[in-house]
């Protein structure tokens, strides 16, 4: 989509939060084992380990679960239980860019619901969905601590405030 | 050398602070290159080269962000809100000398919003370079820790108890008593756990402090460590705060390098180190026992109490669990004395509270003040009413578990007990304002929907009750047997309030019942008695945006 070329340019310029999203490694067992080994001696290793896995692969691949279970002396079911408990962990990599749109009360008071409806309609995606061309994943998020400047979002980690349909379209590269 | 201060707080970034900083960079370097880019009125290029841009936290006046300050012989002069396109004009007008301009605000401390505050905990935020320990020391940092090292554990606990400081996360438990319990508990090692899982909508004080003055939190945790006999601290920060996570990690590295953390804190012989861990989007992990389970690498499920974390906390060891603001309030208590802290406040709520004004508000920002202001003062006098310009209809205080207050209750004083007496809570100090377009039935439904998505699943009233609550409100909104379903909803709220294991299921009745009590007309729009505005189109509109997707 022509729409997202601008975002990509911005990301390549290395601006804050610039999308390393497109740089995820494909799943690789040896690399997975290396990440697990780097965290296994930490107290309460599961969370830092899962974060490191997702940072590398863009998600927590199903294949890594038995490996983590083995390393932490847990059952696969227990590891699956941990992964599935937390909203942040994904089972599939996201699109090249991720927009986390706040849906909590402070942003609601400034029209976040209408903004979300507009965006979902515009991008033709459901929550957690990715646009057809794989450019953007839309995630709902419940509070970014930007409650004085809502409605707010994080675009590839870059905070955006006082959003309205016009402003978000501009940020997404002038999608028409 | 002229110093220019531009915030790097995430909310300032959301309004373009990085672009403003980049514009300063370009303009100042452009001026250095030669007179071609220098406009009349500018100082000679030689002088401009002596300009340093320092990125700070935010002062918390978000309608003025990005707010740029310049150091002049008369003190700092602020300009704002500055857009990147204003920068060339500002420089040409002589802003580096503090000259007049339409964006000139004068001295920040003279702005009424700041002048009315009592900044104890946020004294340095927005002023210092958050990652300069020298700057921190120059602004009174480490005085509290030095005094704590002289006093020793027992007297630190005495001072903190005397100050009247209560948990700023929401529960309001006396901090000194919590520390004493942990100090006296048998078990080793002991831990200090800082709850930075600030998930309540309308709150951002933890984030601002970690981004704008992280050494205050480190100092507070070190003091807690000495007092409780703990050598290790954990900070559990939410993943929705990537900027706070990065700044705090950088501050930890500096603190270790400079001997503030490590084998011997400031050369005292006390060992204390801190590790930051990042959450993964679970609201319930802001509940202390669920947070502990998450830190241990488990699902963030709530534990039954007792045992208290002070006796059996992280990895089964005695643990102090405190909110960011609680710990960050401690250095002031130690450096300025318990009396100075205790002298401010109202009733049993002593000291200051960083109140976070948020939502549909003209002057939204951080307002640290002694307890006892009324809700009306906060919303109308200080907050300036709505941003939309429409009348204020409801104010939710204390996050998603807090009650919705109508203007008729604006005389309620900001104080733990006063809010409890009116079936509400101050929580972590978030105040979210809604104008007259808000539909309170819809807000009540959202509360149940949020609880259903965020329930840890351990106890039945919360796990099942929230789903049933959503369904009942849907029926009410659709005009289906409204009276009977309203009665059912109240009964369900009663069950959740008294039967849930933690504050999530236990407090979600606050927003629901307050909406029902103070805004009944929103729940019965089909009845002529309520104005008969017709069947609700919004019924059943809520979507499963928070459905687990793994």
Image (spheres, coloured by chain):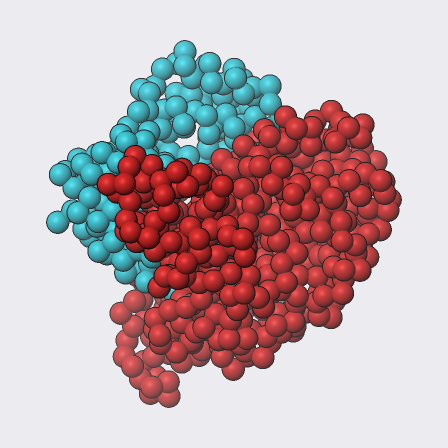
Chain colours: A cyan, B red
Residue A14 lies, in percent from the top left, at 32, 31
Quarter of the rendering containing residue B138: top right
Q: Is A129 situated above or below A29?
A: below
Residue B215 lies, in percent from the top left, at 62, 40
Residue at 33% x, 20% y: name it. Answer: A25
Residue B335 lies, in percent from the top left, at 76, 49
Q: Nearer the viewer, residue B377 or A92?
A: B377
Decide if residue B496 is in sight here: no
Quarter of the rendering containing residue B271: top right
* Residue most extreme to the top: A30
* Residue most extreme to the bottom: B529
Decide if residue B220 is in sight here: yes
Q: Is B440 situated above or below B60?
A: below
Residue at 23% x, 34% y: name it. Answer: A8
Q: Quadrant of the C terminus of chain B?
A: top left
Quarter of the rendering containing residue A42: top right
Residue B140 lies, in percent from the top left, at 68, 46
- B7 displayed left or right of B27: right
- A49 displayed left or right of B182: left
Residue at 74% x, 31% y: name it. Answer: B265
- B532 displayed left or right of B53: left
Q: Nearer the viewer, residue B193 or A27?
A: B193
């Amino acid at each position: 989509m022509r729409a997202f070329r601008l975002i990509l340019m911005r990301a390549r310029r290395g601006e804050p939060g610039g999308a390393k999203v497109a740089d995820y490694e494909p799943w690789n067992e040896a690399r997975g084992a290396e990440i697990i080994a780097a965290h296994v001696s930490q107290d309460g290793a599961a969370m830092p380990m899962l974060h490191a896995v997702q940072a590398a692969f863009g998600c927590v691949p199903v294949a890594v679960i038995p490996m983590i279970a083995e390393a932490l002396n847990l059952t696969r079911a227990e590891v699956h239980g941990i992964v599935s408990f937390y909203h942040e962990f994904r089972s599939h990599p996201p699109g090249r860019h991720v927009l986390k749109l706040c849906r909590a009360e402070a942003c609601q008071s400034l029209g976040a619901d209408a903004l979300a409806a507009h965006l979902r309609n515009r991008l033709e995606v459901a929550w957690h969905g990715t646009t057809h061309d794989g450019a953007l994943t839309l995630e709902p998020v419940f509070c970014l601590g930007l409650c004085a400047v809502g409605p707010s979002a994080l675009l590839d980690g870059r905070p955006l405030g006082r959003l309205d349909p016009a402003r978000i379209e501009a940020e997404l590269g002038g999608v028409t | 050398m002229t110093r220019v201060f531009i915030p790097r707080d995430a909310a300032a970034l959301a309004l373009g602070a990085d672009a403003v900083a980049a514009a300063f960079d370009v303009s100042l370097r452009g001026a250095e290159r030669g007179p071609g880019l220098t406009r009349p009125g500018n100082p000679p290029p030689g002088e401009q080269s002596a300009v340093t841009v320092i990125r700070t936290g935010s002062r918390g006046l978000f309608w003025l962000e990005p707010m740029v300050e310049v150091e002049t012989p008369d003190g700092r002069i602020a300009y704002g809100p500055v857009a990147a396109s204003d920068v060339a004009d500002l420089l040409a007008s002589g802003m580096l000398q503090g000259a007049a301009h339409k964006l000139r605000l004068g001295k920040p401390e003279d702005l009424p919003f700041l002048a009315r505050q009592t900044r104890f905990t946020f004294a340095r935020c927005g002023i210092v370079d958050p990652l300069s320990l020298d700057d921190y020391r120059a602004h009174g940092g480490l005085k509290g820790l030095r005094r704590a090292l002289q006093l020793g554990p027992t007297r630190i606990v005495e001072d903190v108890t005397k100050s009247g400081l209560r948990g700023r996360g929401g529960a309001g438990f006396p901090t000194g008593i919590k520390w004493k319990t942990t100090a006296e508990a048998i078990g080793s090692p002991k831990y200090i756990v800082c709850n930075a899982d600030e998930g309540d909508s309308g709150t951002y004080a933890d984030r601002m402090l970690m981004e704008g003055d992280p050494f205050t939190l480190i100092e507070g945790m070190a003091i807690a460590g000495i007092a409780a006999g703990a050598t290790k601290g954990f900070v559990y920060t939410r993943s929705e705060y990537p900027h706070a996570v990065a700044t705090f990690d950088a501050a930890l590295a500096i603190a270790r390098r400079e001997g503030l953390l490590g084998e011997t804190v400031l050369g005292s012989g006390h060992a204390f180190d801190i590790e930051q861990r990042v959450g993964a989007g679970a609201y319930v992990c802001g509940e202390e026992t669920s947070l502990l389970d998450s830190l241990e690498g488990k699902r963030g499920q709530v534990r039954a109490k007792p045992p208290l974390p002070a006796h059996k906390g992280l990895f089964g060891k005695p643990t102090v669990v405190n909110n960011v603001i609680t710990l960050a309030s401690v250095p002031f208590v130690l450096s300025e004395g318990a009396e100075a802290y205790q002298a401010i406040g109202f009733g049993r709520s002593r000291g200051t509270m960083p109140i976070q004004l948020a939502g549909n508000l003209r002057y939204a920002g951080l307002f640290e003040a002694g307890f006892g202001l009324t809700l009306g003062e906060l919303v109308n006098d200080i907050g300036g009413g709505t941003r939309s310009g429409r009348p204020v209809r409801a104010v939710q205080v204390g996050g998603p578990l807090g009650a919705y207050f109508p203007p008729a209750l604006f005389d309620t004083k900001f104080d733990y007990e006063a809010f409890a007496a009116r079936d509400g809570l101050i929580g972590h100090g978030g105040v979210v304002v809604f104008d007259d377009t808000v539909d309170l039935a819809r807000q009540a439904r959202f509360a149940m929907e949020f609880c259903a998505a965020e329930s840890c699943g351990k106890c039945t009233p919360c796990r099942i009750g929230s789903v049933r609550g959503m369904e009942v409100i849907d029926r009410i909104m659709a005009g289906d047997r409204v009276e009977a379903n309203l009665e059912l909803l109240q009964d369900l709220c009663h069950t959740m309030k008294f039967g849930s294991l933690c504050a999530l299921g236990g407090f979600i009745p606050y927003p629901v019942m307050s909406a029902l009590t103070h805004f009944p007309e929103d729940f019965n729009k089909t009845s002529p008695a309520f104005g008969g505005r017709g069947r609700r189109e919004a019924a059943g509109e809520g979507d499963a945006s928070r459905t687990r997707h793994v």
